Amino acid sequence: MASKAPKSQKSSSAPAQAAALPADALDHPLLSRNALLTAGGAVGVLWLMAAMLASVVLAVLAGLVTVVAIGGYVWLRRMNARQRRVLDLLQGAQASPEARRAAVESLAAGDQGSKDVLSRIARAQLEMQDDPDRALKTLEGLDLVKVPAVAADEVRVVRAQIYLYKGRLPEARGMADDIQLKNAQTSAARAMMVAMVAEAWARTGKHEAAWDLLTPVDPHAADLAQVKWPLLFARVFAAYHCGKKERCRKDLEALMGDDVNLLGRFVMPGQKVHPELMKLAQAVVQTHPDVKRMAKQAQRQGMRYR
């Protein structure tokens, strides 16, 4: 795409064209009213039994369980507060590039290494908007074998989308194949997983399976607004490789309707897009009113200099 490509809505920096993981995907409540009531009830039952049976053993056991429960509660409160801080930083980082850089610095300063998974994911999502390689380095430092399953899949999603953007398809496929959709906490988080898995599959020969995975998901659904673009990116690749050229064109047009710069994903060098898909995307770009107007202006200027 030409360097002076028009902007139909807002400017989209290249790395950011692969939308960030939905914020609610990172919001895992560590404390819930039901969990607290259940734990409190269990401790209460132990003390009641100890009192009714006048059992010293049960009383000692109840005391130990109470101490452990209180310790666990304090630890969860601290973790919950840390999680909220990270999510607040993510939200505040959207205000400006300066706010984003400040949030990255704050997250990096508080990094506790491989144990700080949530912070690493949040930091990488901010870094990928300016420097995808730096974001990858942040995430590649995590040992996914030691990370809880849900968090590990979130890391794989972010790594996969960066690999896909950079045209590192074998590595994206490796991430996608290990993503467990059942671990998604919300519909938006699951849709993001589907988008990454489907795009990786579609671009590495497993296009029929990718299309089947995408078919039940509506990228235009109101509750999936956060992941509309990744879903459409995936559908373009899957539809093209499955021979569904008209569907492919419609999804390209839908992307262009939001922001013509999004089609840079299919026409910019280094994306490892099939030449015919690239031509189709270029043809769609040429139908954009701003592109048409620029072409006419260039034609008039050329005629003046003849």
Image (tube, helix red, strand yellow):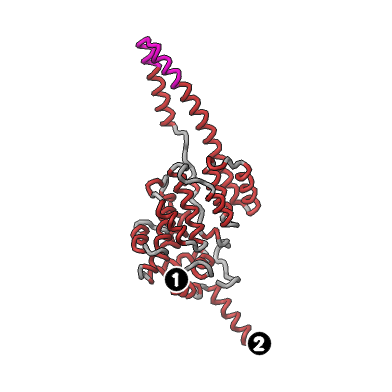
Q: Position of residue 160 (x, y in %)?
A: 47, 56
Q: Give the residues in magenta.
A: 47-65
Q: What residue would you read off at disc 1?
A: 274
**Residue 131 position by quadrant:** bottom right
Residue 106 lies, in percent from the top left, at 63, 44
User: Under tag 2, what secondary structure?
Assistant: loop
What residue is shown at x 57% (from left), y 57% (from top)? Answer: 133
In the rendering, at what x and y percent does residue 83 appear?
Answer: 53, 39
Q: Residues within 10 Å of mark 2 (few under 14, many from 20)?
A: few
Q: Secondary structure at mark 1?
A: loop
Q: Which residue matches tag 2?
A: 305
Tell me what residue is drawn at x 57 percent, y 61 percent.
13
Residue 222 visible here: no
| Quarter containing the C terminus | bottom right
What amino acid is found at the position of numbered circle 2 in the picture?
A: Tyr
Mark 1 or mark 2: whose residue is earlier in sequence? 1
Q: Nearer the viewer, residue 163 or 228?
A: 163
Residue at 64 percent of width and 51 percent of height: 101
Give yes or no for residue 243 being in the magenta stretch.
no
Labels 1, 2: front one: 1
Marks 1 and 2 sit apart, C-alpha to C-alpha, by: 37 Å
